[in-house]
């Protein structure tokens, strides 16, 4: 599989006159642009708003949580000066070193400390600097945090634990700073997994995650930290967890994604209507665990066609779970085989990232296959 992919890439690179080569390897600003187009949304809330990008919305949510909950603490690698992506900037100065503080470079220790803190009744908000490095904490998260309530017969729990971490492609992160690990944790009952698509969603979902009674992995698509900008309500507000959003409506094809991929699929839906005369439901799953089956099932029963897209590798990606559940629940409604457009089963590449990600062209090709089946 790897050799086939690499041979295709080398063949493409050997033909510098091809449009694909020019688009991907040119140094022009147009070709260096990101692989998606962010379209701001409007918050359906009354009151004052402020222009925020995603990291500022996260910062604002953390500020509110610390202000309203005296037991809340924020900790992780380099959070005292704002962290790599500046999500915690200014919080230590405002709330003190006892409530916002650095930890050693030890993901297992960060998770274990957060679990212990949450079991005492405090609100623990941990940061893992990059989602790629959350795996040393896998045992603590899956064997301790997720099972704490169950193994104690509901005598103890660590539901006030939230672990934030940036994930997914950023344009230059390569194999150690671009991965999407959500599927690893989706096999672990007892956790919630949340992935926002925008600043408005990030603030409301993060506050809900911090205040819910279950441990939460809150994964933030890092490419959106600065590229996604919206008018975000400055007030305290929460958004429902485990409830998918239908961000565009249609009757012909259902497109399902989460995080950055939602913006790719929104553009694919526009392309499908313009080029194929096809109208698509675009669904942001929002929560990976638990996920909103009803919204997806109802859409597929209406359209009869399903495309799932995510940046994580194809094999055992969460799209496989969605596809299996839809096949079981909606089999008689399907008009075509379910399509998955995902990352390839290789390490995340550096120079070949434009080929790896499930961009609008790969997704549009899958839509075309669905309607022509």
Image: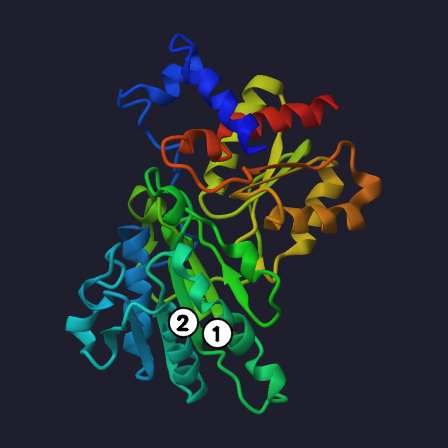
Along the line of sight, the residue nearer the viewer: 284 or 348: 348
Element marked by disc 2: helix
Give the crowd class for mark 2: few <14, some 14-19, many >=20 residues within 10 Å: some
Along the line of sight, the residue nearer the viewer: 248 or 123: 123
* Residue 65 x, y percent position in the rendering: 33, 73
Q: As drawn, which residue projects farthest toward the bottom?
A: 155
Q: Quadrant of residue 185?
A: bottom right
Quick check: 258 left or right of 178?
right
Find disc 2 in the rendering and name its residue: 108
Q: Say whether marks 2 and 1 touch (CB < 8 Å).
A: yes
* Residue 321 x, y percent position in the rendering: 67, 51
Looking at the image, residue 224 lies above or below residue 304? below
Q: Earlier in the sequence, mark 2 or mark 1?
A: 2
Find disc 1 in the rendering and name its residue: 140
Q: Is residue 317 visible?
A: yes
Along the line of sight, the residue nearer the viewer: 183 or 332: 183
In the rendered image, the quadrant that contains the C terminus is top right
Along the line of sight, the residue nearer the viewer: 42 or 103: 103
Q: As drawn, which residue projects farthest toward the left?
A: 93
Q: Determine the residue positioned at 63% across, 89% down.
A: 153
* Residue 121 x, y percent position in the rendering: 42, 87
Q: Determine the residue positioned at 31% across, 19% down.
A: 26
């Amino acid at each position: 599989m790897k050799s086939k992919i690499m041979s295709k890439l080398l063949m493409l690179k050997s033909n510098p006159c091809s449009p694909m080569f020019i688009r991907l390897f040119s140094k022009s600003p147009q070709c260096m642009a990101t692989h998606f187009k962010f379209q701001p949304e409007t918050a359906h809330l009354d009151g004052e708003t402020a222009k925020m990008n995603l990291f500022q919305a996260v910062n604002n949510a953390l500020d509110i949580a610390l202000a309203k909950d005296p037991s809340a603490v924020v900790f992780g690698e380099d959070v005292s000066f704002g962290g790599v992506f500046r999500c915690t900037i200014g919080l230590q100065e405002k709330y003190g070193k006892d409530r916002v503080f650095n930890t050693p470079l030890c993901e297992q220790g960060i998770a274990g400390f957060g679990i212990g803190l949450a079991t005492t009744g405090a609100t623990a908000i941990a940061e893992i600097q990059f989602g790629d490095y959350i795996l040393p904490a896998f045992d603590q998260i899956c064997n301790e945090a997720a099972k704490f309530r169950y193994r104690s017969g509901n005598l103890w729990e660590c539901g006030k634990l939230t672990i934030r971490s940036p994930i997914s492609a950023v344009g230059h992160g390569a194999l150690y700073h671009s991965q999407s690990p959500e599927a690893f944790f989706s096999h672990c009952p007892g956790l919630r997994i949340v992935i926002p698509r925008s600043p408005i969603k990030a603030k409301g979902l993060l506050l809900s995650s911090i205040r819910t009674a279950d441990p939460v992995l809150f994964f933030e698509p890092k490419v959106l930290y600065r590229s996604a900008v919206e008018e975000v309500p400055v007030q305290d507000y929460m958004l429902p967890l485990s409830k998918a959003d239908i961000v565009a409506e249609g009757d012909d094809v259902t497109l399902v994604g989460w995080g950055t991929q939602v913006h790719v699929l929104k553009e694919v839906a526009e392309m499908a209507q313009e080029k194929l005369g096809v109208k698509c439901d675009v669904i942001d799953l929002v929560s990976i665990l638990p996920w909103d089956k009803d919204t997806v099932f109802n859409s597929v029963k209406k359209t009869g066609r399903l495309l799932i897209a995510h940046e994580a590798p194809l094999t055992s990606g969460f799209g496989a779970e969605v596809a299996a559940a839809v096949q079981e629940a909606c089999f008689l409604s399907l008009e075509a085989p379910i399509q998955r457009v995902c990352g390839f089963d290789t390490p995340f590449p550096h120079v070949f990232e434009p080929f790896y990600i499930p961009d609008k062209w790969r997704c549009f090709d899958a839509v075309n296959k669905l309607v022509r089946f």
